[in-house]
Amino acid sequence: MTEFDLHIKDGTIVDGTRKPRYTGDLWIKDGRIAHMGGKQTGSAVDTIEAEGLIVAPGFVDLHTHYDAQIRWDPWCTISGWHGVTSVVLGNCGFGFAPVKPDFRERSMLTMTRTEAIPYESMKEGMPWDWETIPEYLDSLDRADKGVNVIQYMPTASLMTYVMGLEAAKSRAATDAERREMQRLLHEGMDAGLCGFSIQRLGPDSVQADFDGSPMVTDTMADEDILALAEVLRERGEGFIQITQAQGDIKKDLAFLEKLAATADRPILHNVVLPSRKNPEIHRRPLRWIEGCRERGLPIYAQCGTGRAGFAFTLEHWNLYDASPAWRAVTTGSKEDKIRGMQDPELRQALVDEAEAADRRLRAIQAGVGGNPKYLVIQSVNDQPELEAYVGRAVGDIADEQGKHPIEVMLDLSLAGDLNVEFLGPDRGANAEYMAEMMTDSEYAIPGVSDGGAHTKFFTGGAYTTDFLSWLVRDEELVSLEEAHYRLSNLPAQAAGFKDRGVLSEGAAADVVVYDMDALAIDPPWIGSVEHDLPGGEWRRVQRAIGYKAIIVNGVVTFADGECTGATPGCLLRHGCA
């Protein structure tokens, strides 16, 4: 009689292939699914009673920034709390390898700004026992992991390593530098990388560097990107994540088509978002992707499907960086920011820019944080003299005081030592458009959690729970089978994960067991503050309710929401363990 490691009994199995759900058992042995479906003769060391519960493949989170956090939080929470069992690191071209020893400090400073990861946490929590990509991957392999991981080549790090920071930001690579970057990408792919990533947002990038200048890849030359794509084509493996928005939509899309044709490998296009009122906002890019597919160009849409809010202070906020005027007052040390916000010329520049009603800036502000006049005062640094403003909209205060809303933001921030917190109000989301985006295109992947980034004002890692509880359970607009295909199988296919994203005999046993009726995010919208980062730093979090078990490689990592302490995750070199 066979002895199994784990028996999941009488659950409703949704296998991730779109096959209709059915009631049955799932048996796990040696980290893999040994048997599914009917009753199996044998015993198990442990049993999970799953009657009335959903049993599905663990979720695959393609867009995270846990590159630092995984070193002190093996489960990559927030994502790990919400059923994510596999993550991709090194998104947007950002990361920590390859890196020369004398550039470690600068690389951490970059991440404090562009992805808003606390410096003290990185300084205390990262081992820095690598320089090259092979050394980095070996270090990541040795580290405790509560989730599975695949790793991009962070292109900004690669360019800086080869060219030096100043050159990488100011010019195209020489032929010799381009060949060296190709060589290092080959070396990294040999060691197990999954491809490369790029953010190219132009000189007014919404995610700027530590000094307010664009990130290295923001102004990267076409030829340098295409040279890296040639490496993937030559190897016949890997994929590319790219966020391309340089101001001319037609040129941006034409370049993505050229990139897909050059690489002949999957391209993850970031990011497709639905609006509340205009369906063309998401239909237009999805039609473009369908047209690309008809011409054999393997492009996927990474779609923003989470509904997490923003609550931020001007001490830490960086997501108005597309605005030169905002960058001028929010770059540098806290003292630099205070001086900038007090400077009459810089203040007037902010007001003038807002009055000019730049369309790109309006769109960015609507998506991240909100238009300043609609922001609500959330807290005032425990200063009694400011308490009367709590709960009020910036625009209302501005009308009352005869000021511009920007002036109100600056004045309140200065009065509260930059720790007055502004809340982007929940203005609702269009469930119909969100569901349409997830059901009408075969190539639309939910997510863009940004997990591990913007830790003091964003909680996108809860998108999986939100997707299931909102679009499947509450709105009944997406079927359970379709949801699990989108959350697990499709992203695994796009990213080259082997034996992940589905429940099938012989596949890796990454499994979630949850109660659909109980599924919830705690607390909703903006989360709560927890002081659980190294260096005494805090972050904003949203925990999960309703997960009976989260299982990685056959081992339970969370039981009824509590971490078991197990770290069975693997570095998946070339997509497999």
Image (cartoon, rainbow, N blue to C red):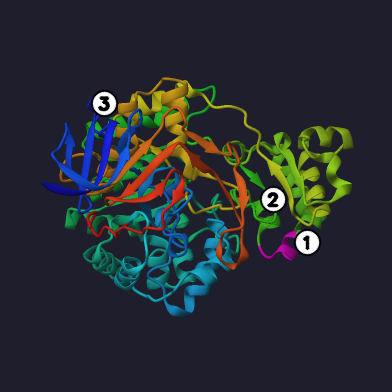
Q: Is residue 493 left or right of residue 376?
A: left
Query: Residue at point 69% right, 38% down?
Result: 356
Residue 271 percent across, percent down from the top left: 43, 40
Query: Which of the two labelled residues, at mark 1 and mark 2, occupies the earlier sequence position?
Result: 2
Q: What count of labels does the image hold?
A: 3
Q: Residues within 10 Å of mark 1 (few under 14, many from 20)?
A: some
- Amino acid type, residue under disc 1 in the picture: Arg
Please check the rendered image and state whether residue 336 is part of the magenta-colored stretch, yes or no.
yes
Nearest to viewer (mark 3 / mark 2): 3
The quadrant in which residue 12 appears is top left
Circle 2 sits in a helix, a strand or a loop, which is it?
loop
Residue 536 percent across, percent down from the top left: 62, 65
Between marks 1 and 2, how big is the CA–CA gap?
Answer: 16 Å
- Amino acid type, residue under disc 2 in the picture: Thr
Residue at mark 3: 21
Between marks 1 and 3, how big is the CA–CA gap?
Answer: 60 Å
Single out the residue that lies furthest toward the left.
1
User: Dots 1 and 2: beta carbons under 8 Å?
Assistant: no
Circle 3 sits in a helix, a strand or a loop, which is it?
loop
Nearest to viewer (mark 1 / mark 2): 2
Magenta stretch, main secondary structure class: helix
Point out the stretch of residues depicted in magenta.
Answer: 332-337
- Amino acid type, residue under disc 3 in the picture: Arg
Circle number at residue 339? 1
The front one of 158 and 493 is 493
Please check the rendered image and state whether residue 16 is part of the magenta-colored stretch, yes or no.
no
The front one of 93 and 436 is 436
Query: Which of the two labelled residues, at mark 1 and mark 3, occupies the earlier sequence position?
Result: 3
